[in-house]
Amino acid sequence: MPMLTSQTRVGVVGAGAMGRGIAQVAAAAGHDVVLSDAMPGAAARAGVAMAGTLAALVAKGKLDEGVCAAIVARIEVVDAALGDNVGVLADCGLVIEAIVEDLAAKRALFTRLGGVVAPDAILASNTSSLAIAAIASDCPSPERVIGIHFFNPAPVMPLVEVIPWMGTSAAVRDASMRRVAAWGKTVVVCADTPGFIVNRVARAFYGEAIRIAEEGIASYATIDWAMKTIGGFRMGPFELMDFIGNDVNFAVTRSVYDGFFQDPRYRPSLTQLRLVQAGFLGKKSGRGYYDYRAGAAMPKPATDDNVGSAIVDRVRAMLINEAVDALNLGVASAEDIDLAMVQGVNYPRGLLAWCDELGAAAVLSTLEWLQSEYGEDRYRPSPLLRRVAREGRRFRT
């Protein structure tokens, strides 16, 4: 049975923003950490960047200088995780992969790692949407493979999705949950389905907002205003996509769409594809749905409460329907679905609890109108929503 304690050496493969964030979380919890990357110099640069981030927290009075020094000292940075230096991970009891979101690359890495680490070491993927079963398939002792999905930035965001695939041992699942919880994270457990909880349910936040804009009902700025001011969301869908990166957001949407055999509920948008093709990736490229270049003026929303309420009703109904369907198909418990959306993407409240507040019949009515108006299967109500509305029940007690 795998035993993960604060003395377990932790390996992190992939020194991008997610990898170095995960390394920081583990080191802050007292673990010795090996942060590695196959790209020459990447791990060293990540170490410097992490030290700078921690020093900035010290300067702001948010972190003790001694604690900062201890975290930095616990992290060893190593190049070439897939090359000659892969042996540096041999004594790690837990290795978390945070490399490029490419199935072939992840499978190759897990196959290599499986032959290097101890037989009872746990191998985890930080993938946001790829199948854990597919990643584990060629790995020696695949029962010790699991998904441990952090949210960016990992040191700040409280949520972690733990995803056992159908062959993950119960001991590995339980040990992973306990260790991540010991790191101060909120753990939810979900089935190995496309997008898990958060990236599955959140597709509607982006996709339906884009459809509303494409139909000329409202501008990007107006939709963002409505979702924040009336809906209570921390960020609007278009500013959030620009913040995440339209290339990243589009890739996750395509992955979920393909993972569900082209279910129209998750169909990607031509609008977002054109932005990606044009290189308008959002803030990081200077242009996205909005123009962030020097001197560019941000567009002003049309602050019409009637239009805004219609926008919120439509997007919210789609979000609730997706959360209900995730519950219906056993992706996660009602509690974990609501917890994931609040702590993973800062939604104003859990979607199932929100449905209870609005009334399942009211949400169902909105979806039935959309399905009748558009004649599209993307608006089909979940069978569970229909049952709860018919029986007058609630999702949360």
Image (cartoon, grey):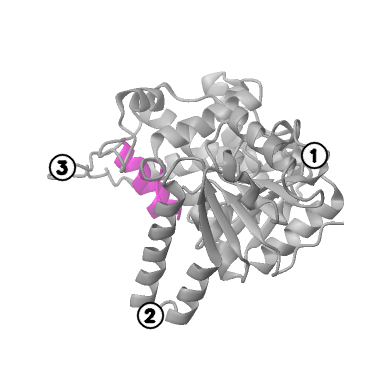
**Residue 342 to residue 42: above or below:** below
Q: Secondary structure at mark 2?
A: loop
Q: Earlier in the sequence, mark 2 or mark 3?
A: 2
**Residue 89 to residue 6: above or below:** above
Q: Label 3 amino acid?
A: Ala
Q: CA distance from mark 2 to mark 3?
A: 35 Å
Q: CA distance from mark 1 to mark 2?
A: 44 Å
The residue shown at (39%, 39%) is 245
Q: Quadrant of residue 273?
A: top left
Mark 2 neighbour class, 10 Å CA radius: few under 14, some 14 to 19, many 20 or more? few
Question: Which residue is denoted by mark 1 in the rendering?
Answer: 142
Q: Quadrant of residue 103?
A: top right
Q: Earlier in the sequence, mark 1 or mark 2?
A: 2
Marking on residue 61: 2
172, 44: nearer the viewer? 44
123, 166: nearer the viewer? 123
| Position of residue 246 in the picture relative to residue 391 (left or right) | left
Mark 1 neighbour class, 10 Å CA radius: few under 14, some 14 to 19, many 20 or more? many
Q: Position of residue 187 (x, y in %)?
A: 68, 58
Q: Is the C-beta separation of discs 1 and 3 under 8 Å? A: no
Question: Which residue is denoted by mark 3 in the rendering?
Answer: 296
Residue 256 magenta-drawn?
no
Q: Is the C-beta separation of discs 2 and 3 under 8 Å? A: no
Q: Is residue 174 shown to the viewer in this render?
A: yes
The mark lying in front, picked from 1 and 2, is 1
Q: Is residue 355 shown to the viewer in this render?
A: no
The mark lying in front, picked from 2 and 3, is 2
* Range drawn in magenta: 219-240
**Residue 23 to residue 286: above or below:** below
| Position of residue 313 in the picture relative to residue 187 (left or right) | left
The residue shown at (61%, 70%) is 29
